[in-house]
Amino acid sequence: MGATGECAVIGLALIAQLAMVANGPDSATACGTAQFSVAARAPGRIAPRIAIRGGAWVTVHAAWTSHVDSGPEPVAVTEGVVTMTPVRHGHLAGPRFVASAGSLIDSASTPALDVRGGADAEPVIVVNARLDRPDHRDLLREPLFVGEQVDYVVDVRLNEEARNRLRRNPTFFPPEMPGVLAYDLAAPTSTSRERGSCFQTLSYRRALFALFPGRTTIAPATLTYALPLSASFFSREESFEVRTDSVTLDAKDPPAMGRPVSYAGAVGSLSATLRVDATRARMGDPLVATVTLSGTGNVKLWPRPVLALSWASISAGDERVAIDSSGPTLRGTKDVELLLTPHAAGAQRIPSLEYVYFDPVRREYATALTAPVSVQIAPAALASVDTASLPRLPLVREFGTAVRRPLLDRSLFWLVLAVVPIPAAARRFGRARPPRARLAIDELTRRVRDTTLAPAALRRLMLAALSDRTGALAFDGTADGLIRALRRRGVTADTSRDAGALFAQLDAAAFSGTVTLPGDVAERVLSLLARVDAEAVRPASTSPLRLPLLLATLALVPILAASSDDLSAARSLFDRGVTRYDAGDAAGAQRIFLQATRRAPHVVALWRNAGTSAWSRGDTATAVRAWQRGMRLAPLNADLREQLSMAPGGIGSPGYLPPVPLDALAILAACCWLAAWTVLALPAARRPAQQRRLVSVAMTGAVVFLLGA
């Protein structure tokens, strides 16, 4: 077989097996850090996992990345940079790294290296951000569910030299965390030290609860600290800022398989109790029943329990939440009050209440049960029925069709708004920009050999050239003022001092009349300008269209694909809700109708029946909210407006909805937006005289109409 054939066989053999390589430094310092780079590749699309066998080394920080190289045969690659510290000095063997991918295993070690003593060790502070469950279960092997606690941990590791020089604790600034609910856990009271390591660890922890399924990226956290420049107590301090890597949180909804119908979204491990404020009452006198939910989890977001009684009407009361974040797991209690108004006398019974929740540790649904409570209701002297009960309204019997999705919910509408500014932007940025003004520099270059160039003229040209390069120079006309102005523009200290000295020489020659300039002063000015040109910060350019272009970019934000309505499932729930309402179970019908609105949010009949069911059971707040959602879909629906008028409120109330279709406001906003950008896209000769005012009015109108919609 030829050499080419042998190379091909060797290449295929390498691709078909797991391979890895590790590199490290030649020397290190005890109580210091050393960085090792590791890479492993394996056939297929599953990234290899790399384990660290430190031996005489302790891992301080490790950052890993994985990707798949596409080709005839896909290859998964895992790369990383590991920061480690030696536990002793001398001639030490390098750390060993073991990679595994399925049944394939390979290892690599770095060469031995010499570790010097730690007398000259520098202060080292390393930060690392990670996600960890309170019970330390593996996030990669067991998925994270929405509503389950995961800890955001920032480990701060510092060596002996850093601990001795720190005068105060570092300051931790957590990042913004969109899409999650965060709670600060108890602050660390002491540092922990790894066995055999010069580093101690201080950990900051926050409990996170994902609010939505999907992937969420948490930005890097920031840690600031200050170290003195010397051992003196009065020594100045130098501030430092270090940032962690970003971390990714991937959450999923609780499993649909085995989910009970009455599950409302509670996640955690909890128990429930029920108590009433009195065991004896009279018809028409309200009783307060309190359901206490206690356990671990996101207590604030546990939904209200649902209770249905045939002998009393029920309305919602207050809620009280108490959270305990002193332990590793967030826990607390939630007291939910239910106001019971009896309308039947005799010995009555509050049955055992079932509260369904999902336990993320056991990964299964469970039910918390309350003990039944017996109450004695005496007859009322003046009333035999609940006078506070609301009238029973009729339901809509026809499911109907989904209302056409409003323009504001369509991605095409927002896409058109985002495309409209393109012609104006193309005209603005398509014009050739004139070069940077260099008139003073060019004139100075032409006249550099002119022996008749007066010192005052040379001084003026020098200042004009500096202004052309760095922007308008504001200084007090002295050499020291010029030095400070150039330093603010980024010019080095040496160049600034040379410029100040040359300016003072020109200034003396221009105004005294007795100082004679050397013959090469013009060449010195040109050389100085070249140094300033190389060092100064470039002046920022401004664009008059910056704000409109920013508004055009923001128009792209709402372009999100809306989920399609599941009409078949919603129709089935609609029929079930009507049946439950006819059977007298308004609470059950309300729950079913609201569940159907999540499947088909653009069906007016679902919102109308959800509000009707809530109104019939005395939950006027939910009824008004449901009717308002229906009114937003059909602002001109007379039946909905008549039902909504039964609730207190009018034109001045916060819940008032004007009879104006949403599409009309959206079209008006689009017209104003189009008019503003049309004026900006016109050639300068054809623009109206009041173009600035017209564009401002049109832009303001577009924003006002969009906010109104």
Image (cartoon, grey):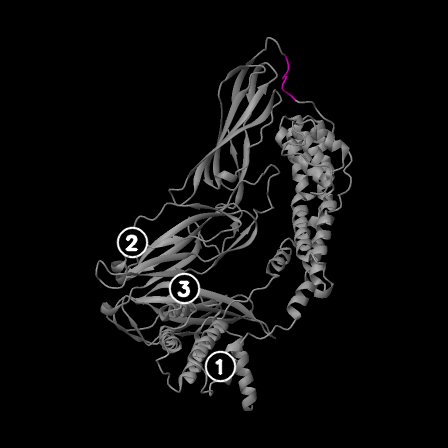
Q: Is residue 388 magenta?
A: yes
For the view shown, which residue lies furthest in the bottom direction? 2
Indicate the position of residue 53 as horizontal and vertical percent values.
36, 66
Q: Which residues are magenta?
A: 384-389
Residue drawn at 37 percent across, 71 percent down: 479
Comparing marks 1 and 2, which lies closer to the viewer? 1
**Which disc is residue 168 wearing?**
2
Q: Is residue 313 visible?
A: yes
Indicate the position of residue 38 as horizontal and vertical percent values.
43, 71
Q: Tag 2: residue type? A: Arg
Residue drawn at 58 percent across, 47 percent down: 255
Comparing marks 2 and 3, which lies closer to the viewer? 2
Q: Earlier in the sequence, mark 2 or mark 3?
A: 3
Query: Foreground residue, 179 or 559?
Result: 559
* Residue placed under numbered mark 3 in the picture: 62
Q: Earlier in the sequence, mark 1 or mark 2?
A: 2
Q: Secondary structure at mark 2?
A: loop
